[in-house]
Amino acid sequence: MQGKKLYQEKLFSSFQLSHRVPENNFYRRLQTVLDLSFLYKKTQSYYGSCGQKSIDPVVFYKLCLVGYLENIISDRKLIEHCSMRLDILFFLGFDIDEQLPWHSTLSRTRQLFPEKIFEEVFTHILSMCVETGMVAGHTQAMDSAPIKANASMDSLELKVPEEQLEAYLEKARYQSREDRKPKKNKASRNQQIITADKRELQEIKSRNRNWQKNQDQRPGAANKGAKYTSNKTHYSPTDPDARISVKPGKARKLNYLNNISVDTANHVITDVKAYHADKKDNQYLQDATKRLKHRLKKQGLLWTTLLADAGYSSGENYAFLEKENIISYIPPHGTYKGGPEGFTFCKEDNYWLCPQGKKVTFRKRKMVTNSLQDHYLTKRSDCKNCPIKKKCLGKSHEKRIAITVYVEQYQRNNKRVRSKFGRYMKGKRQSTVEPVFGTLTGFMGLRKINTIGIAQANKVMHMSATAYNLKKLMKFISKSTETMTNQAIVLSFSLKRYFGLIKADLSSQ
């Protein structure tokens, strides 16, 4: 007989979430593992002693974690999503007839709590991973990637000299009564004033002049209004902490730099930090190393080896890592040559010997583009009648050699990188840290920073990394439990078989 379902809402019903959420559900299992009760004490000082009660700090952080676990970066959509999921309601401690907090409450609470609270939760989850045996600690892979800021390139404004600032703003922001009011400029006065010198401004002017002609393969270069923008001449009034940066083959955007370290044992993130995107990776390595080493030491782990790409290469970094007793596997960048071809270095007397037997003597040591270099020169008379002068000097009158003072550190690192084990470690790095970035940006809500300011961006990155580690932890626990169950079954079967054979032998006697 054909059935037909008729729906009619009941006035009264008996319903329990615990009966509806399966025992093997992810959020039900996560609830039994995750304990964030320490947040009550940590956040107590940020609340008053009277007035309306705020959102529970544990509920707030659980809601944030759900957003990154479900790849939802909008607070409004997150609340809508959670209200439709029974398992998430059970994880949050809400019944089906309870109202979830307003989406704006999440935003205000995120701004209320400082960065250290989010870092402490990240460290707490990392400690859980260490306790379960997921983190080895001895080998760490480091990498960085730009994350799009919550600001448009159309919002850029031109930096001007200090004496012209007021006049420029008055002209740029002039609006009639019929126009809407201008948006608030969040940049400080120092950020609005140009700091580039004449040489840098001339370089930028030349790039602007040749942009459409020579950069026709870049995205957006064919646009009539396309121009070269620089952090030295432009800033964003919407998000002053965001910086203009670009990846090969992609358009220039306002970004933040996400720097992470990943343990090679089970791909657990051990460190994460938001930086400005206008600097190179190697300028952040020492800060990240000090922070990570301190964190691993507190966990009782010894860090011995660092894996990174060529972006982190510099003589200063190689020397720093050797001082910290950390073995580096960082390929040298393309500008490092190790000295001119055909020249021999005499270490005892500190000079170079050219192929014709002339000395290139030491003159001075100075800092060039954040790199400490030794400079060597020949005498003009030595090169005047040299048979290879044109090939060796070009249009110059004497031979000039500028080389990093950390040549020995480069050589030791390069020897490790080019060894058979070094090639293995390169593959280890690529298979460790790069998939983690893909997961964070594609599936853990880190495709864009939905907040304003570097402090808020740092909170977002910590929450995304925390959610990633939690997911790794739950998978590891599940596999361990399954393995132990299988081992118990095999042991039980073996014992039964063993005692069965003994019983058979006794009966035969």
Image (tube, rainbow, N blue to C red):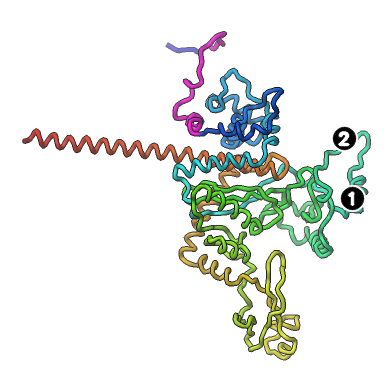
| Left or right of 302, for residue 53 | right
Q: What residue is rendered at 73% in x and 52% in y?
A: 244
Type of the residue with mark 2: Arg
Q: Quadrant of residue 347?
A: bottom right
Judge whether 377 appears above or below 335 on screen.
Answer: below
Q: Which residue is mark 1?
A: 165
Q: What residue is rendered at 72% in x and 68% in y?
A: 368
Choose mark 1 or mark 2, whichever is in front.
Answer: 1
**Would residue 344 be seen by someone viewing this image from the given angle?**
no
**Would residue 156 be seen by someone viewing this image from the given angle?**
yes
Judge whether 215 appears above or below 89 on screen.
Answer: below
Judge whether 209 appears above or below 29 on screen.
Answer: below
Q: Residue 136: percent from the left, percent from the top?
A: 47, 50
Q: Earlier in the sequence, mark 1 or mark 2?
A: 1
| Left or right of 203, for residue 327 | left
Q: CA distance from mark 1 to mark 2?
A: 22 Å
Which residues fall within the magenta stretch?
6-33
Task: Check residue 359 for magenta coloring.
Answer: no
Q: Quadrant of the C terminus?
A: top left
Q: Quadrant of residue 46?
A: top right
Task: Check residue 24 for magenta coloring.
Answer: yes
Q: Residue furthest left?
A: 509
Type of the residue with mark 1: Leu
Q: Quadrant of the N terminus?
A: top left
Numbered badge on residue 180: 2
- How dense is the environment of label 1, judged by Cα within 10 Å: few (below 14), some, or many (20 and up)? some
Helix, strand or loop for disc 1: helix
Q: Residue 481: percent from the left, percent from the top?
A: 39, 37
Disc 1 and disc 2 in contact, CB within 8 angstroms: no
